[in-house]
Amino acid sequence: MKTVTLLRRAALICAGLLAGSAAAFTPVLTPALTTQATKEGDTMSRDTGVYTWGPYLLKTYTEDIVLKADSPEVDGIALGTPYERLRYESFLDTFQAMPLTPDQAAQFAQKWNNKISFLLYTHSPGPVAQEEELWQQAYNQGEATNTPGREHSYLDLYQPATLTVAGKTLTAKPEIDGPYGDQFTLPAGTPQFRYLGVVHYTFDLTGLPTNGSVTLNFKDSGGKAYTQKADLSQLR
């Protein structure tokens, strides 16, 4: 079982509650914005070691590692634009003492041209000890597939999500970061190890409007449906 690093995935949700500025969404970063995003991520990493999501954090369901009786599987939903994804990459690379070079930043920004990614921060519905059994049941029922190189977990049950943009529906497959093991606190105050992970859904908006509202629809591993709107005109 993997363990979480110092950059705890659950902690990033809390960090998103900090203030941040918003600006118009830019599908293709200019050299000036590429430099600015790189600098912002690098500065956050050096000054505090805490990544500030700001307006890119669209929704929080769980603000700490204390699980309430009705806590959903999804802890929070964030939106990654080309600007935010570069800022985050710069933050991580500086944190690992490998700051992005200008060429690396430019290449990373180009990879994200016209793309946005919804990031779902999640935790397993049951304890780690039950994960293999639950996964096997889902596999036997044709609800899970064996993914080489990744531990079996609830994350294997995530299915493609849809994004509605200007009346057009796009579909994206889940990309998984995890599972990682972490200790949560149950309503009674007792500790319990759960898996957690980040599910990414990335959509290409080439040729589509990038200044209005978009709607994401997806289901968690238990089949619970979620709908999340985002106003791209409010995000850089």
Image (spheres, helix red, strand yellow):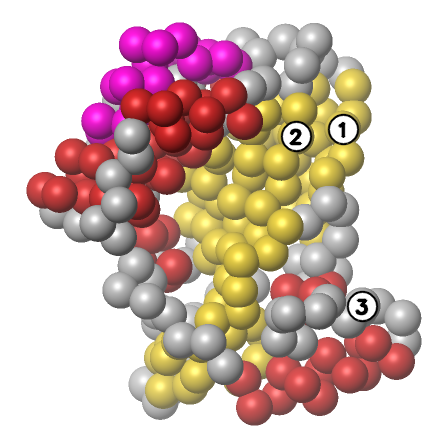
Residue 11 rendering spot, x and y as whole percentages: 31, 58
Residue 226 rendering spot, x and y as whole percentages: 65, 47
Asked if the magenta segment contains residue 27, the reply would be yes
Q: Which residues are magenta?
A: 22-40
> Viewed as shown, does residue 167 lie left or right of 213?
right
* Residue 203, label in figure: 2
Q: Nearer the viewer, residue 26 or 63?
A: 26
Mark 1–mark 2 contact, CB under 8 Å?
yes
Quadrant of residue 169 within the rendered picture: top right
User: Circle 3 — which element?
Assistant: loop
* Residue 170, label in figure: 1
- CA gap, disc 3 to disc 1? 23 Å
Residue type, numbered disc 2? Phe
- Determine the residue positioned at 26% across, 34% down: 41
Residue 10 rendering spot, x and y as whole percentages: 37, 61
- Determine the residue positioned at 64% across, 70% down: 149
- Determine the residue positioned at 32% across, 67% down: 5
> Viewed as shown, does residue 221 lie left or right of 193?
right
- CA gap, disc 3 to disc 2? 23 Å
